Image (tube, helix red, strand yellow):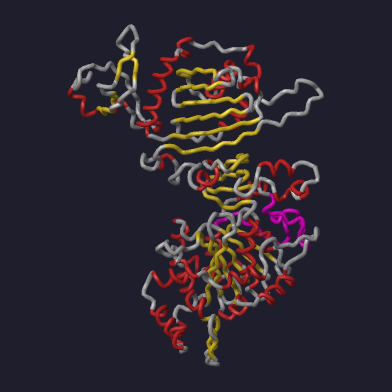
Amino acid sequence: MVNARHCKNDIADVDPQLHFPRVAVISTVCGVISFVFGCGVRIVNLPRDKGKLPIQPDRLENMHQVPLQGLRVLNLTDESANYTSLSESWFVFDASDRDEDDESAAGIGNQLLVDIKNVNSNFLNSEECLKKAMIALLAENDFEPVSYYCRSRNHAGYSCHGHFDEAVMNLYTFPFHGVISLDLLTRDEEDLISFLEKIEGVFAIPEEKIHQLDEDYPPPQMTWTHKLRNFRHEFGVEDYHEGGKSVVEGELTQDILSQPGFEMKKQLAFVETKYQNVHFYEAINTRFRSVASYEKSLSKDGSYESLHPELFRQDKIVFLDGDSQSSLYGEAVYHEGLVHAAMLTHPNPKRVAIIGGGEGATLREVLKHKTVQEVVMIDIDGEFVQLCRKYLPEWSDCSDLVGSTTPSCFDDDRARVYFEDAFQWFIDRFATVDNKKGVEGEDFFDVIIMDACDPTNDFVTKLYVDSTFVWSIYNGLSESGVFVAQIGRSSSHTGGIDETKMFKNMFEEVGFESMHIYDEGHSGFYEPWSHLVALKSAASRKLWYRNSAQTEIEIQKRISTTYSGKPALLYFDASVMSSYQLPDKVHEDVYCRLQERRECKAAWEMIKNHTIDVEIINTGHAFNPLYERNILHYEPNEGSIQSRVFVWL
């Protein structure tokens, strides 16, 4: 790459015609039309007479005529190279020239918008430096220049335009402020994330001190957004990528790449494992934190930010196939909510299984329980686990936990980690079992935690259609066993259908006697997330419905302390558990709306009339948010029913 710092002494030779403004205008018009219509453009001699086209009638069926009133193009057949008006003519291009096998003709595009501050003012005010930097950036990526030029902005910076084959670049400089703004648009299907490091190397030129005693200038700082242009799915772009979408589509683009509110964005790593595309990013979401506070936290000025830098650090986010999985500021809430509600519902959990959980945070939370003697974690993607150990070490950090034997939770003596298909692992051992142990002598688990794909995922849905896996979960639990899974986005009043209905019905059919849904809205997913707890025995309901005082006592008894003296649990406590005990009203509404359930209508009549119908109460008892929200306790032997509003004895 050409070093832009030395551009004044090494100016590239450029064809003078490439700087001729009129040709630049022509290239710009052609480039815009190319991007819009996704095909080759042919500039033709346009007749002045209305209704006459410079083509043969038999080729009309392959032509597209586009009126471009007011634009001007060069009459290529005129040796004097004059302009001709399009006010009474048609601009004609031949669609038959497009190669159907050319992916670049599909109307796709990527756009990168970059702002850099604290840039060297002399560099920003040098036309030669800017031209050379622009050419160096795109030439290294095999983009051939068609035309480029720079225009002075009243001796205070430049605006430059470059038209390359398959790319257009504009940049604007503001020397007095040390700022440069760039706009790069390409027709290539590949994203432009790889350009960021090159842009920083070419354009982020720091200010230089004039005198040795001068204070150091702040280093250049870059902010950017990446956008997927054009109507990609309408043009069939999804066919270009295995799995149906680009590696930068989905929540990765919606939440991070295209959002200007995320500053100091940086891709820590992108790896294609055998099973998935993995992105690790760090950024500052300016809705909640500021770049100024982050910079202050790095100082030693005695400010609040510098004394508590952990509160102002950049967020880390991991994406799998473009979908957000976990973030630094949301992972504790998510993993504590997933693990501890289920663990406290078992009287004495000693053996725990984790399905998925590759980041290591679910394992970390389980190991906080003093009663735990063994944790079996099964994740199919061993490469992803190793990446998380490298880029997300906080997720699996057990160094401060009293009782843990190693800094990394993965290496704890109580942990057994398998890199296998977790579904098949359970099926092989527990699809059919005797009353003592599973196949291969595998002991039963007190708690099974599924931190894997959503049940609405197509692949996982196929597994649930075959009840073999669900039976293996049921068989793999001890008599008082508890199963918990995250089941995706919470239902909404306007959502229409319950996408997890099949999942819940299957667990009820295999024999789980009580199921409970709870929502957590602080996990960093921009919307509430639902979890399902399934109890093998209805007797465990008493533990699920402990009051706050009882729950707090259990937390103090079970959760390990830390060497630092900080609380082991950052979010979960008795009040949080109380909020989980009853499902949100939307679950009741969705439950009764989707089908004619006689227990829904009958239950309200029963509560209204102060009557008890044991048959109705027992209908759908494993999962019935209506009863759970309105009838907390029923003792058939005593003939009593306790309501949230009234108590009848």
Residue 567's place in the image compared with 596, above or below, is above
Residue 524 appears at what percent x and percent y? 58, 54
- Quadrant in which the N terminus appears: top right
Q: Is residue 385 above or below residue 631?
A: above
Q: Main secondary structure of the magenta part?
A: loop
Find residue 188 and report its horizontal and vertical position in percent.
45, 31
207 or 315, which lies in front? Answer: 207
Q: Position of residue 611 (x, y in %)?
A: 46, 89
- Left of 97 or right of it: where is 294? right
Quarter the C terminus occupies: bottom right
Spot the residue most to the front.
154
* Above-or-below relation of 532 to 16: below
Does 395 lie within the magenta span?
yes
Residue 440: horizontal and vertical position, in percent? 60, 66
Q: Nearer the viewer, residue 55 or 85?
A: 85
Q: Along the line of sight, which residue is nearer the eye, 34 or 387?
A: 34
Q: In terms of image quadrants, where is residue 545?
A: bottom right
Q: Residue at x 36, y 42 (%)?
A: 234
* Magenta stretch, residue numbers: 393-421
